[in-house]
Structures are given as structure tokens and as C-alpha cells.
Image (cartoon, rainbow, N blue to C red):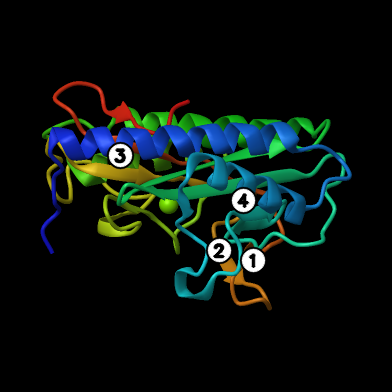
């Protein structure tokens, strides 16, 4: 399938959706501390969705039961908020998606709960850094594989591994549009990037091996070896210069 491009007006609408996502994510991250339940974060998200008059992209998506994804420690993505209590030293990935005036925004970040280990801190820094490397490679006339390879090189040169079973994605009126954006690949390969493409770039990085499995709730993805995992995501627009990050406060 061809990869669509957005008009300037459509990108302006996505910028609004993205700003709301970023503000909600910032609010949720500020609520994270030992003793908080992930269901509490979901409730805070509902308050914010109401305040901004937007809908969660995730609630009801293929039956997903909550408004955000919360994934703790060895959980990679798609964790369901619930009664689990966050503890000092945990790492929590929060993924937020909203629909605003028909357009989607999608972003994620991993935060430490209280004080975290040096290794966990490094995992978060490397994962966020790999997102930056991927975004820096998302230039007009570059190839999709340039983004994938930039992320993979950044992660692996720091001794961690990229999850392979889940990818970033095109985004617009739908949360998941073409293309899939793997976090591993070969530079110079894949479709050429054009101005106006809107992409959700989202490295998922494990401190151990890259394999994952899906948990008993049929949603939560965990690392196969029990190692820690982190996830950072931005929605960006390809321009004729540096890609514009749309999910900024
Ligand atoms: Mg996404």
C-alpha cells in the first residue's frame, strides 16, 4: 500500500492532537510515585481527556479495556492499568493516544518510580536517545530503513536490544497507517520518505534479549527473559528539514 502524505492543514490538526497527548503524558508522569496504582493513572487520564474534550485512541481498540497503556519493568508495551501498586525502583512505560478533530496523536515515555538503579537509568537514557536518533534520520528523501537502522545502531552499540515483534507506524486519521516502522533494519532500504508523511516512531528496548511473549491477559507484552524494557515514542511529520515532533507540550 502506498504511504500517504498529509496537507499542511492536516498536519496542523495533528499538531493540536499531539500537543494534547504530550500534555497528558506530562501530567501522568508527574503523578508517578511509589504507592500509586496504575488504575489511578488511568483515572487521571480520563480527567484530562474530559478537560481537552478528546477521546482515547486505545480504549476499545480491539477490545482494549483502558485509556492508556501502563507497562512495568519486564513489561514492554500494552500493559493494562489495574490494581498493581508502583514500587520504588520500578520503571513504568506510559503510552497515550488521543483522537482530536478526527486526527490521532500517539506518544510514550518510560519513567522511574522513585530512585531507580543505574542500569535502569541507562536503559531509559539509551531508549530515549535511540528515539532521537530515529527522528534525526526521518528526513525527506531518506529511506524508511534509515530510521530503523539509526535506532538499532544506537541501541545495540550501547549493549541493549531492540524488540522486533512490534513496530512504529504511520499515523493520521487512523492510529495505525502504512508503513510499519521496525526498530531494526538496513540503511538505504525501504520506501523513500516524503514531506508530509506522519510517523509514530517508537523504539522498545530490552536490557536483555530482544524476544518477547504475550502475557495471560492476552495484551501485556513481556520480555521473554524477564529483563527490563523501556519505550519512548513521538509522532513526527517529515518536512524538508528536520522532522517536526508533533507530540510536544
Ligand atoms: Mg504507537
Residue closer to the observer: 61 or 196: 61
Q: Residues within 10 Å of mark 3 (few under 14, many from 20)?
A: many
Residue closer to the observer: 123 or 186: 123
Disc 1 secondary structure class: loop
Mark 4 or mark 2, which is nearer to you?
4
- Residue 78 visible (yes or no): yes
Distance from the alpha carbon under mark 4 to that under mark 2? 33 Å
Q: Which mark is first along the chain, 2 or 4?
A: 4
Q: Mark 4 sits on what residue?
A: 46
Mark 4 or mark 3, which is nearer to you?
4
Q: Please, is residue 234 above or below residue 168 in the view?
A: above
Circles 1 and 2: CB atoms closer than 8 Å = yes
Q: Residue at x 38, y 40 (%)?
A: 17
Image spot of residue 200 (x, y percent): 36, 45
Q: Which mark is first along the chain, 2 or 1?
A: 2
Distance from the alpha carbon under mark 1 to that under mark 3? 35 Å
Amino acid at each position: 500500500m502506498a504511504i500517504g502524505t498529509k496537507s499542511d492543514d492536516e498536519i496542523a490538526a495533528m499538531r493540536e492532537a499531539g500537543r494534547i497527548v504530550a500534555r497528558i503524558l506530562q501530567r501522568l508522569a508527574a503523578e508517578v510515585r511509589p504507592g500509586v496504582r496504575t488504575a489511578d493513572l488511568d483515572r487521571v487520564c480520563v480527567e484530562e481527556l474530559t478537560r481537552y474534550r478528546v477521546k482515547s485512541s486505545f480504549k476499545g481498540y480491539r477490545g482494549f479495556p483502558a485509556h492508556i497503556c501502563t507497562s512495568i519493568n519486564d513489561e514492554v508495551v500494552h500493559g493494562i492499568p489495574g490494581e498493581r501498586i508502583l514500587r520504588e525502583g520500578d520503571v513504568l512505560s506510559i503510552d497515550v493516544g488521543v483522537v482530536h478533530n478526527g486526527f490521532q496523536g500517539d506518544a510514550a515515555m518510560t519513567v522511574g518510580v522513585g530512585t531507580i538503579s543505574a542500569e535502569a537509568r541507562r536503559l531509559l537514557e539509551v531508549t530515549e536517545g535511540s528515539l532521537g536518533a530515529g527522528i534525526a534520520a526521518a528526513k525527506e528523501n531518506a529511506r524508511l530503513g534509515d530510521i530503523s537502522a539509526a535506532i538499532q545502531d544506537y541501541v545495540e552499540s550501547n549493549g541493549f536490544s531492540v524488540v522486533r515483534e512490534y513496530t512504529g507506524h504511520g499515523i493520521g486519521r487512523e492510529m495505525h497507517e502504512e508503513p510499519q516502522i521496525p526498530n531494526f533494519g538496513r540503511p538505504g532500504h525501504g520506501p523513500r520518505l516524503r514531506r508530509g508523511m506522519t510517523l509514530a516512531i517508537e523504539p522498545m528496548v530490552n536490557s536483555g534479549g530482544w524476544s518477547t511473549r504475550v502475557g495471560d491477559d492476552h495484551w501485556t507484552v513481556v520480555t521473554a527473559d524477564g529483563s527490563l524494557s523501556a519505550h519512548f515514542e513521538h509522532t513526527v511529520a517529515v518536512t524538508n528539514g528536520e522532522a517536526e515532533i508533533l507530540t510536544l507540550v
